[in-house]
Image (cartoon, coloured by chain):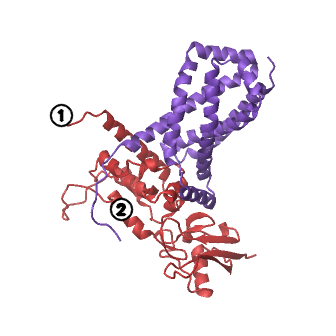
Chain colours: A red, B purple
Amino acid sequence: MARTLTFEIFRYNPAIPEQKPQMQCFTLAETANMTLFIALNRLREEQDPSLVFDFCCRAGICGSCGMVVNGRPRLACQTKTADLPERIILLPLPVFKLVGDLSVDTGVWFRDMYQKTRSWIHTKKAFDSDQEEERMDNAVAEQIYELERCVECGCCIAACGTARMRDDFLGAASLNRIARFALDPRDERTDQDYFEIIGNDYGIFGCMGLLACEDVCPKHLPLQNQLGFLRRKMGITALKQLFRKSSCAS
Amino acid sequence: MSIHATMHIVSPSRRDAYFDWLQMLTGLGLVIFMALHTALNLSIIFGAKSLDIVAGALEVLHLDTLAHVFVPILFLVHFVLAARKIPFRVDGQLAIWRDARLLNHRDTWLWIVQTISGMVILILGAIHMWTTITAGAVQAASSVARVQSSGWTMFYLLLIPLVQGHVFIGLYRIGVKWGVITDKMRPKVVKILVITFAGVLILALLALARYATLTI
């Protein structure tokens, strides 16, 4: 027998300051293979056209529909209502700027992160468009691809206890970007270069190992392993510097 | 208003890396000490004589003197380093509390348990260390007399679970933070640690019961 789902949805439009944040209840008859994407679209079409939420791909690729579902940051398009209880509470992702209701602006945060982590291939080689692309070992390419699968939904940041306490903490998505470039043989940055970006309490040493990032990542990225890898790599880089003789003769 | 002028440039520093190493190493040092300390205490289960034999062996190796000097230092340094991550302002405390309640995520709750237990251990552990160090050599008769004097059984009934919990959570945390425990190993390691913790705690409480009831 089909269930009747009760949705408690956070409603607030920051553009209307006199409006107070509130939870609004909706009910909806569950249908076969219903996802939160389908449910929210039906609610908007059938009950309240003012409901604000983000969607694009419907297939867990664009990362637009991240929201807090019964306490856990998840992608709405990947979340089947059959896996949830009858009462479903939907909140916008914390940490990010609220656009309205369930919609947050992850774009500004990720653009800022890209600039902080200098998230592009650093090479002194001049680009020649006529040349064949440099070949890469398949195993390395697969390792890089594994980390490139991040869809920048922001779930790992929203779930991170450190990011909730300190808004200057880079978070797992940023550290995963660094791990990705550290693997890439085309990037000429040294460990010391990476250390200058993440070798501090804003970066890898600020991570407290709560692993909510690992546990909520909708793409199941190996974040725990990458954070461990970076902590060891940056820790060893610092120790090497400690035992290295100063290049300036006094 | 945004500021586009650079007022100063933060000098790259290795300080946070060294602090993180030290936090991990002092934690590991305390875990090793606690393993030896628990082994010593468990010997009371077999009677006062066995505790005196184990304590005597540790004395011959001068491990008691080393512990009396280095453990308080490790204890304090570890607290100061770990406290860097603890929110002392109310807004930070509320943020992590709300996060843990919203997520209902095991490892986030464990961190809160570790933080609160750390604070209590700072006080109770300091009292315990002061009492035992000033009492001189470890002997079954004096230890039993202390535990049986007013309030000390309750004191240790609170301290023992907190310390053992803190040790096991800390060991797990070091493992996942430094990548020794990988994502694939994690569920199995958690199971092993939970079973070991339960076993050690039961034995430690049994040892406390022996201290509290033994007649010498």
Q: Secondary structure at mark 2?
A: helix
- Mark earlier in primary sequence (1, 2): 2
Q: Looking at the image, is B91 positioned above or below residue B213?
A: below
Q: Horizontal and vertical percent for residue B160?
A: 68, 35
- Left/right placement of residue A206 relative to residue A82 reads left
Amino acid under disc 2? Tyr
**Which label number is shown at residue A249?**
1
Which residue position holds label 2?
A114
Determine whether label 1 and label 2 are within 8 Å by CB.
Answer: no
Question: What crowding class fits label 1: few (fewer than 14 Cα within 10 Å), some (14-19), or many (20 or more)?
Answer: few
- Left/right placement of residue A141 relative to residue B59 reads left
Q: Looking at the image, is A155 positioned above or below residue A65?
A: above
Chain identity of mark 1: A
- Left/right placement of residue A211 relative to residue B209 reads left
Identified at 65% across, 17% down, the residue is: B55
Q: Are marks 1 and 2 on the same chain?
A: yes
Q: B179 or B79: which is nearer to us?
A: B79
**Which label number is shown at residue B176?**
none
Cα gap from disc 1 to disc 2, whole angstroms: 37 Å
The reply to whether residue B181 is visible in this rendering is no
Image quarter of the C terminus of chain A: top left
Q: Looking at the image, is B173 positioned above or below residue A166?
A: above
Q: Horizontal and vertical percent for residue A232?
A: 42, 42
Q: Horizontal and vertical percent for residue A28?
A: 68, 80
